[in-house]
Image (cartoon, coloured by chain):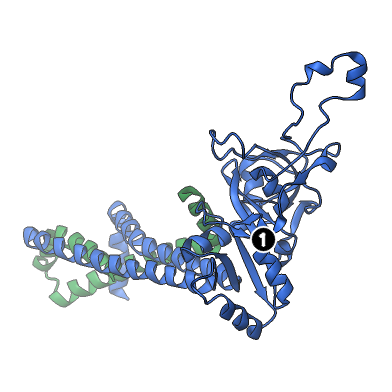
Chain colours: A green, B blue
Amino acid sequence: MAAFAAIGLVVFLSYRLRAREIATAVKLGARGGMVVRLLAAETVTLMLISSGIAALGAGVVSRNARAWLGWLLTLGG
Amino acid sequence: MNALYLAFAYLRYHWGRSLVLVLVAALILFVPAATQVLLSTSERVLLSRGAATPLLLGSRGSQLDLTMSALYFSEERPDPVAMREVEDIWDGGLAVPIPVHTAFSSGGFRIVGTTLDYFDFRRLKLSEGRGLSLLGDAVIGADVAKAMGRGVGDALVSSPENLFDLDGVYPLEMPIVGVLAPTNSPDDQAVFVDIKTAWVIQGIGHGHEDAVTAAEVADGTAALSSAAVLQYQRITPDNIQSFHFHGNQDDFPASAVIVVPNDTRAATILKGRYLETGKPTQLIEPGAVVQSLVDRIFRIKTLLDVVTGIKLWRPSRPSVWWCS
């Protein structure tokens, strides 16, 4: 839940920083719906790539979890 | 389709910015996922170790300390339980008792004094060497072998527990006779010895040497030997026969006793026998103790998740206002 909130925040802030670009696109004649579709497509593409990388990482962690857990516990000891 | 093409072209053109966004989002998704994987694995590992140990007999006191000491070889030192209790369980014929003595360590790894039943009970296999057969032999876990860079043919020395304890714990050199195959369990980080070896480290058992030999008397050098009794720091084929124990073995200590009942009925009968609060010992189910510990940890985790969610949400509002 917190992770999704953080991602939402990151995406939202990145679009806030690009507000001028979007305003230019609107001035050039892009309709509101088109801008929203473009931003949604961008977000989906970004999320797909990010999720892929995260899933890959989680897979590696899952495969080595027992060994790494032992190592972490050794550090704690 | 057209929007996707344009979006992808935009992301490719601004590849630096896109890369940062992808990495940040991937990291945000990865960290909780990895934490979840590690937490669920730790829960599974903790519970499986607890569930694989049906009953644990120990001295009355903290059940958690007893469990951590006997199952995970932690540094907790519960009060010792007398070997008499082991004999009582043997005599009862309802279960197999496996004593564990975890009071000492070597090079930061716990020395676990036990009987050969332990290896069968935990299904521990040797990757190198042989099992315990002589007093003083040590079989080390896979992590101990890797961390210390030692194997069969090398030796370990027990760490002195207290420099000021002059009459008790003498460091003992133990030859490594076997290395266990890795199990990803606390057994990987333990040095296994026979429980009698642990008693030798404790000072209950020791060896003697004839301080004056016939040859020395003949040579006239007998007077040079001042001590009639020597405490051995190494058990060798030459002196092993001289090792003996003082006192009644029933009074010798163990840290805990793993009790493997024959069936559910036997377990219930045994549990009933230790219900009296007046007894100096208690019989616990380690699985239940570990489960309550895990429940407590996960309750704290849920609380932390809620707090993190609130913390993430609250600072975001002013920044949104600031941007607009």
Question: Local crowd at mark 1 within 10 Å, few (<14), some, or many (≥20)?
Answer: some
Query: Where, quadrant-wise, is the C terminus of chain B in this rendering?
Result: bottom left
Amino acid type at circle 1 is Met
Instruction: Decide: is B229 above or below B100.
Output: above
- Give coordinates of residue B84: x percent, y percent: 67, 63
Q: Quadrant of residue B176?
A: top right
Question: Can residue B294 be seen here?
Answer: yes
- Give coordinates of residue A29: x percent, y percent: 11, 70
Residue under label 1? B83
Instruction: Decide: is B217 above or below B56.
Output: above
Residue farthest bottom in this picture: B265
Q: At 66% across and 73% down in the image, what residue appears?
A: B260
Q: At 83% across and 37% down in the image, what residue appears?
A: B239
Residue farthest top in this picture: B220
In the image: residue B95, left or right of residue A27: right
Query: Where, quadrant-wise, is the N terminus of chain B in this rendering?
Result: bottom left
